[in-house]
Image: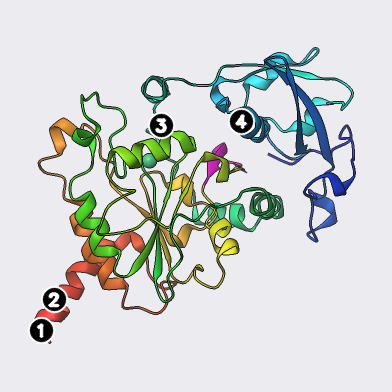
Amino acid sequence: METPTPESAVPSSSATGVPCSSLLAVEDEVAEMTLTVKWSGKEYTVRVCGDDSVAELKRRICELTNVLPKRQKLLYPRIANKFADDSLILSQFNLKPSIKMTMIGTVEDDIFIDQLDSPEIVDDLELGQDEVVDVKDKNVNKQKLQRRISQYKIKLRNPCRDGKKLLVLDIDYTLFDHRSPAENPLELMRPYLHEFMSAVYAEYDIIVWSATSMKWVELKMGQLGVLNNPNYKITALLDHLAMITVQTDSHGTFDCKPLGLIWANFPRFYSSTNTIMFDDLRRNFVMNPQNGLIIRPFRKAHLNRSTDQELAKLTQYLLAIAELSDFSSLNHRNWESYTEDSSKRRRHS
Ligand code: MG
């Protein structure tokens, strides 16, 4: 999908917020819009750009109101229904700063119910190599990343450590089966989680990044005993607000986790050469495909928790590659054979 020209976008002073376009190509320039959103008797000012999607607008509103994007219904004269499509681009809407938008939605009080009734993402995309390169190199996506870098504040729970690599971990289906019912969340924890974390902590700083709200991330990690474990420390937690929305020709619009956000925040410690990220969804890596490792999803915990070995095996891989000074030449799709080869090498030496 082409980015439409922002004929309807209303420019506003860049002093009021983050400039939409940095020094990148002029043709991709889009104007910033300041919108007023009414919710629950109060008015909120939201700054977005013409090339932002509806999903991004809802994320901005979520930052101010804590109403999750999927719970928001946006009303605006004559165009209310179109806000149901998260992939649409705001410059198509002819939004005017003088007209107020109304949001209807409630803050979650029961995030467990929220998790269980959210639609399950099962089909992952397999983008062609050319298209992956295209997504990460598109100016519009680089600009979105720049905006996210200026807007999202990463809160360090523990200091970055000199000389350590960086491991970024997804939660749902990677460390935890969030869809199975259980009396105690520990029943849904992926086997070997703490052993894995403790072992790799020797070589890696650990950041947890989930496409859910921070409330859920903190609660879940706390319940599993990840946040106060005596054997390892978590450097930071990131949530869905740190993600960006990208468009592809073949797979439409979706959210992803751009590692550039972390690298820009901690350039002295982390870069594309020493970072690896585990996620069960390939789409989350689209801005940094070489750094991603697709982990087998941990589903049906009650059935699989006696046999799932994924984290135990990945411990060996992470420790084996930690000897490298640069991860850039690794193909994480071959991680299982790498570990076998390196244990063979050890036996023969
Ligand atoms: Mg996941």
* Number of the front mark, 2 or 4: 4
Amino acid type for the residue under numbered disc 4: Cys
Left or right: 80 with respect to 273? right
Q: Say whether disc 4 or disc 1 marks the residue closer to the N-terminus.
A: 4
> Residue 89, image x and y in percent?
72, 33
Question: What label does residue 121 carry, if any?
Answer: 3
User: Disc 4, disc 3: CB below 8 Å?
Assistant: no
Q: Nearer the viewer, residue 123 or 183?
A: 183
Q: Is disc 2's CB within 8 Å of ligand 1?
A: no
Vertical position of residue 97 compared to residue 328: above or below: above
Q: How far, Cα to Cα, is label 3 from label 1? A: 44 Å
Considering the numbered disc 1 on the image, is that residue within a helix, a strand or a loop?
helix
Amino acid type for the residue under numbered disc 1: His
Residue 329 visible in the picture: yes
* Number of the front mark, 4 or 1: 4
Label 4 CA crowd tier, 10 Å (few <14, some 14–19, many 20+):
some
**Magenta-tinted stretch:** 246-256
Judge whether residue 254 is colored magenta.
yes
Question: What label does residue 62 carry, if any?
Answer: 4
Q: How far, Cα to Cα, is label 1 from label 2? A: 6 Å
User: Disc 3, disc 1: CB below 8 Å?
Assistant: no
